Image (cartoon, helix red, strand yellow):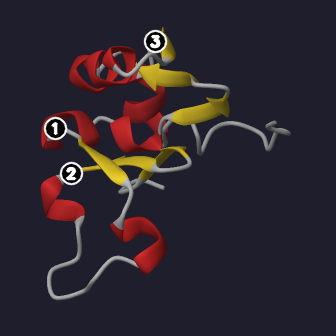
Amino acid sequence: DGAFFYIEEGLYGTTDDMIWPGQDLPKELAEWERISIDPDEARLGACNSMALGNRRHIVTTAAPKLIEELEKRGHSVTPVEWKIGWETYLSGIMCCSMAMWRE
């Protein structure tokens, strides 16, 4: 979850260098659209954002390009200041959250 952000069925995000060289994506993902996440934003927790369902997401404020890409696609984003959590625990929003039911 630090390298791959599941956004919704048919859409995911990752950086170009986080696709494993020499390995193909599973056929189920090969046809999905991919948002290319800026490596600098990924290093600050962008891939560890939280998809809430119904095109709603919680994303670190350190990922303005990802936020813009999601909003361009009609998604609702709640930016959260996560700098202290990331620097203290090196853990993103998804990893620091409890499990929740998503519809």
Q: Are marks 2 and 1 in contact (CB under 8 Å)?
A: yes
Q: Is residue 7 above or below residue 16?
A: above
Q: Decide which of 82, 47 is in the foreground and name it.
A: 47
- Residue at left 81%, top 36%? 103
Q: How many marks?
A: 3
Identify residue type, mark 2.
Thr
Whether residue 93 is visible: no
Q: CA distance from mark 2 to mark 1?
A: 6 Å
- Residue at left 48%, top 35%? 49
Q: Which residue is mark 1?
A: 38
Q: Which residue is mark 3?
A: 79
Which circle's residue, 3 or 1, is located before the other in the chain? 1
Identify residue type, mark 1.
Asp
Q: Are marks 3 and 2 in contact (CB under 8 Å)?
A: no
Q: Is residue 3 above or below residue 37?
A: below
Report crowding for label 3: few under 14, some 14 to 19, many 20 or more residues within 10 A (C-alpha): some
Q: Which residue is mark 2?
A: 15
Q: Secondary structure at mark 2?
A: loop
Q: CA distance from mark 3 to mark 2?
A: 20 Å
| Res 100 → quadrant | top right
Q: Is residue 103 above or below residue 14?
A: above
Report crowding for label 2: few under 14, some 14 to 19, many 20 or more residues within 10 A (C-alpha): many
Q: Secondary structure at mark 1?
A: loop
Which circle's residue, 3 or 2, is located before the other in the chain? 2
Provide residue 81's location: percent of width, then percent of height.
44, 12
Q: CA distance from mark 3 to mark 1?
A: 17 Å
Q: Are marks 3 and 1 in contact (CB under 8 Å)?
A: no
Q: Decide which of 102, 85 is in the foreground and name it.
A: 102
- Residue at left 44%, top 16%? 74
